[in-house]
Amino acid sequence: MATVLRVPAESIGPDSSMDTVPGWDSLRHLTLVLALEEEFGVYIPDEEAGSITPYPLIKLVLTELLEAKA
Amino acid sequence: MRGAIGPADARAVLAADSSTLVQLLRAIETLEQEPQERTVRVGVSSSATVDLLGVYLRRHGLLAATGIEVVPGTFDDPIGDIERFRDAGIGHVVLLPFFDGLLPAFEDRLATLAPGAVDALEERLRSRYRLTLEQAREMDTVFLGTFHRLGTPADIGGRDVVATVLERFNAVLREEAAAFANVRLVDTEDVVRTVGRTAAFDARFYFRSRAPYTGAFLDELARRVTAGARGFGAHFHKVLVLDCDNTLWGGVVGEDSATGIQLGPHDHPGSVFWRVQHQIAALRHQGVLLCLCTKNNPDDVEEVLRRHPDMVLRPEDFAATKVNWDDKPANLRALAAELGVGLDSMVFLDDSPFECEAVRQQLPMVTTVQVPATLSVYPQVVQQVAELFLAGGVTAESRDKTEQYRRRAQAQELQAQSVDQEAYLASLQLTVELRRDVRADAARVSELSQKSNQFNLTTRRYSVAEIERLIDSPQHAVYSLVVGDTFGSAGLTGAAVLRYDGVRAHVESFFLSCRVLGRGVETAVWPQIVDDAVARGCSELRADFVPTAKNAQVADFYDRLGLRIAAEADDGSRSYRIEADDFDTPPPAWIEMSSVG
């Protein structure tokens, strides 16, 4: 996430969201979703793709998707 | 997780098809921290959201050793963007109109639009891009993407209203672009075809953020733009240097003869080479300079070029030729000097991994392409070679430069020698196994004696039975040599037949396959052969050279080996002799010798 958002890795944590991370705008978010899908080998459905902006939610959705895949 | 990687690894990541977006981003960041030979600013103005295009432009730029700084424009404002880019001194622009966005949901509305609406749109489009391109007149290059459709026609015939309007609007772009020499069109519909329609678009982000494209589409688009910009000025290919045997035709002319080579429209594999020659002739027609660089007898090549009925390329198609037995890096240097072009403007096509590697190592600035082992993909490889020359466009002036270069080349025949040749040969780890009287080799030795024309001192042909008899005879020895290097074993590629007569050891025959020439193999075997002769009580070595139409290159072979001429006949035949004690030609230091038998 830090690579895509161009911020230091340690600055990404449970409190991170579009509101707290500078440069995390809707366009950067698009890149982030594509990168997450590629890295984790999942397809994030449309409903989730736009709304998963706080970090804990991203984690939750990815966990669910990975469990569903397993 | 966020481990640092070195520049070499980063470059490998950029080149690999399988790299993920995150891997690419990290590799790009690593390389952009290195000093760049050249940095180019590229403006991107689009009527769709294409943020990721920047990542892929940086990727392909770095692969061409060029740092790319991407300057994004404002959404759907080409005229304003160009003005801003121009004021900022930006030389290259990628301009991407977007069909489905001409009006919201344009493709699906077309069928129900009021009559006249399309005409009005067409006029608006024309004036908009005319103005945009006029503003961009002073820029180096404007890459203008043509329109593609997002959906597919419901009518399986395909010619629906969307297709018709798309065609009309693309004609507008082409017409407007034609007025400006700095505008290069990029066929985005072909990018969609290459990537695959389902892999090119992502509907989720199109509806949400007007970002219709996947990374795969934008990557391919960036690759084409970079190729079209010739790596943003990193290279400008002008010369295609060609080998002959198994590159322009199938087979080896020195062994199969001019009528025995494989070339022609109707047979296999001759038809593959024939097609490739047409591809190369098309390049020549578009201004690419062709050269030959081949290890062959000049007469053989001349014969094929002038008289083979199915040759597409003829002598006048070549700006300069090097048909000799010198190493290829030296010949490429000489060609570059003769034509007055840089080595980095050359593309070298050869079937031999040995030659390709030699050129890659010694002349890394030359773009080296090897003829694929699978012949069916050869035309495809040549198509990629064509892209190197043509992706950047062809100007009318560059056509028919060949004649001009030919004259220059003829005036400046010169010989370049590679100082690095020895170091290269050492890096190959050449091995020669000299085998004496090995019956299992008889068939191959006989075959080689029948086929070898060029490196053959007496051109005596032996049957298998004869070779077997000579092997069994105490008065004779049959040596065979097996050559290997880092590329693997070249197999049994040479032989010598000796006759022992009292104190005299007489070389009846010595022949080598031309595949292994130019590496010192031909001299490496002699100290051992002389030692063997001395061990059986001989004190003198005798040898003959018998000239033929094909073996001119070995006319002075025994002289080079240090033997002295004993007699010379009117037909050019010569006999040589040397006292075994006087023989002191050392084996080349880069060859590791071993012996069997």
Image (tube, coloured by chain):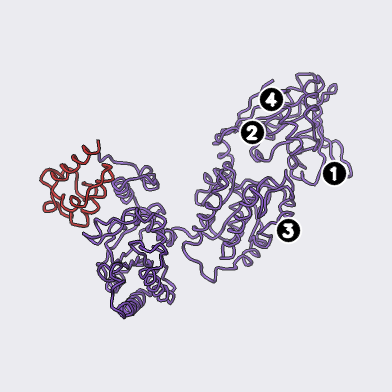
Chain colours: A red, B purple
What amino acid is at disc 1? Gly
Residue count near mark 1 (Cα–Cα under 10 Å), binned few <14, some 14–19, many ≥20 = few
Quarter of the image containing the C terminus of chain B?
Answer: top right
Query: In the rendered structure, which disc, 3 or 2, sits on the residue that comes first in sequence?
Result: 3
Label 2: element kind:
loop
Viewer-nearest of discs 4 and 3: 3
**Disc 4 and disc 3 on one polypeptide chain:** yes
**Residue in the image at 74% along x and 47% along y:** B257
Tell me the mark number nearer the camera, choosing from 4 and 2.
Answer: 4
**What is the distance, in whole Å, between disc 4 and disc 3 at their CAs?**
42 Å
Q: Which residue is mark 3?
A: B306
B534, above or below B356, in the image: above
Q: Decide which of tag 1 and tag 3 comes sooner along the chain.
A: 3
Q: Nearer the viewer, residue B161 or B72?
A: B161
Q: Depth check: B324 or B310 in front?
A: B310
Q: Position of residue B367 (x, y in %)?
A: 51, 52
Q: Position of residue B577 (x, y in %)?
A: 82, 32
Q: Give the residue number, with chain letter if any, for mark 1.
A: B572
Residue B46 appears at what percent x and percent y?
30, 66
Tell me which residue sits at (40%, 76%) in the image.
Answer: B176
